[in-house]
């Protein structure tokens, strides 16, 4: 039986794990950096200075933009870890890309990351002409925790009405942080329950875990109606599979155009790999962006 720790104990473990993970990712990225196509920019917001990586902005012409959010349980990772996938999308889709390095827990628990990402999106939208971005064609997507933040942005954007997205990509997202990882499936390849418990405890106070900006599966139909088309990818060997499929059905019931693909033999995080499933999933992401972001075929009425 897994014995829960205190939030302080989880926080201490998370910081140690982050150092180890950071060193590993640094080794993995040696020799790959694409300086000619990537630019690091910092955006000042009311919620702190946010590091971002920009791809394809050497071209001054107006173009759509895809906003990318990396994974890591809200605790680990950085925008750099998505570079291979973003370079692939840059080549295959042709849109500009901004990868957002949002603040991490436990130092910055919910709602800091949500507020930072929203502020960055608002900045990009407001300054679209300056950056050569078509403000009517902005998409968002992410992997794991980044998938959670992506759909949260879509819900919040609809509620506040300042900007909107043409589509969203949710790659094996955690969408129910109110349910204990001990009560979720534990197939081989899933995030270990101890680690998932650490992520959840570091990111959010349990009293806030049912907030729809934390756990979108608790959203109402009214919250979801009118959201942009969604591509949801779930892994069969993942404790997050069921909540991903549930959210897919919730979106469809709310009238949202939704594509959902399950890869039964794939583990959590598989789209970062070079497997056949990973290549197929990335094919679907590229096709989805070409369909809704580049062509503009979306469910929103034209202005």
Image (tube, grey):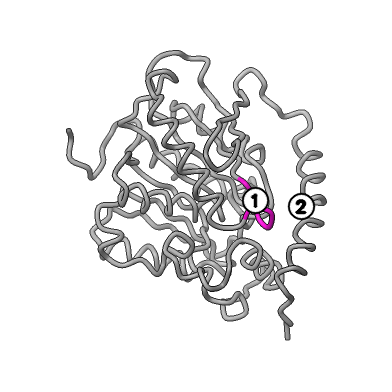
Question: The magenta stretch spans which residues?
Answer: 103-108
* Residue at the image point whose x is 80% and y is 46% from the top: 24
* Residue at the image point whose x is 77% and y is 45% from the top: 22
Q: Position of residue 89 (x, y in %)?
A: 50, 33
Left/right placement of residue 161 relative to residue 14 reads left
Q: Depth check: 210 or 176 in front?
A: 210
Q: Where is residue 71 in the image (x, y as percent from the top left)?
A: 60, 51
* Residue at the image point whose x is 58% and y is 33% from the top: 52
Look at mark 2 in the image and give the residue it sits on.
Answer: 18
Residue 173 lies, with reference to residue 291, above or below; the image says below
Quadrant location, the N terminus: bottom right
Please tell me whether the stretch drawn in magenta is mainly helix, strand or loop: loop
Mark 1 element type: loop
Q: Where is residue 135 in the image (x, y as percent from the top left)?
A: 34, 29
Circles 1 and 2, Cβ within 8 Å, touching? The answer is: yes
- Mark positioned earlier in the residue sequence (1 or 2): 2
Q: Number of marks in the image?
A: 2
107 magenta-colored: yes
């Amino acid at each position: 039986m897994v014995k829960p720790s205190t939030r302080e104990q989880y926080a201490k473990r998370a910081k140690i794990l982050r150092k180890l993970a950071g060193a590993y990712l640094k080794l993995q990225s040696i020799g790959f950096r694409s300086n000619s196509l990537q630019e690091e920019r910092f955006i000042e917001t009311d919620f702190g200075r946010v590091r971002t990586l920009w791809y394809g902005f050497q071209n001054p012409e107006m173009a759509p933009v895809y906003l990318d959010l990396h994974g890591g349980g809200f605790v680990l990772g950085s925008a750099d870890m998505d570079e291979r996938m973003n370079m692939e999308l840059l080549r295959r889709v042709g849109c500009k890309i901004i990868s957002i390095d949002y603040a991490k827990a436990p130092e910055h628990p919910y709602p800091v990351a949500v507020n930072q990402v929203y502020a960055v999106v608002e900045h990009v939208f407001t300054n679209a002409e300056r950056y050569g971005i078509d403000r009517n064609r902005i998409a968002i997507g992410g992997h794991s925790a980044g998938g959670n933040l992506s759909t949260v942005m879509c819900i919040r954007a609809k509620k506040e009405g300042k900007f909107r997205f043409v589509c969203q990509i949710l790659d094996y997202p955690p969408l129910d942080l109110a349910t204990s990882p001990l009560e979720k499936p534990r197939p081989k390849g899933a995030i270990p329950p101890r680690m998932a418990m650490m992520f959840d405890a570091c990111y959010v106070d349990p009293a806030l875990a049912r907030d729809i900006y934390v756990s979108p599966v608790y959203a109402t139909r009214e919250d979801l109606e009118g959201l942009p088309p969604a591509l949801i990818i779930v892994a069969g060997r993942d404790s997050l599979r069921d909540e991903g499929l549930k959210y897919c059905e919730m979106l469809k019931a709310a009238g949202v155009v939704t594509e959902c693909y399950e890869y039964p033999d794939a583990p959590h995080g598989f789209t970062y790999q070079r497997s056949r499933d990973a290549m197929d999933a990335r094919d679907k992401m590229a096709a989805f962006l070409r369909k809704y972001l580049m062509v503009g075929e979306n469910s929103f009425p034209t202005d």
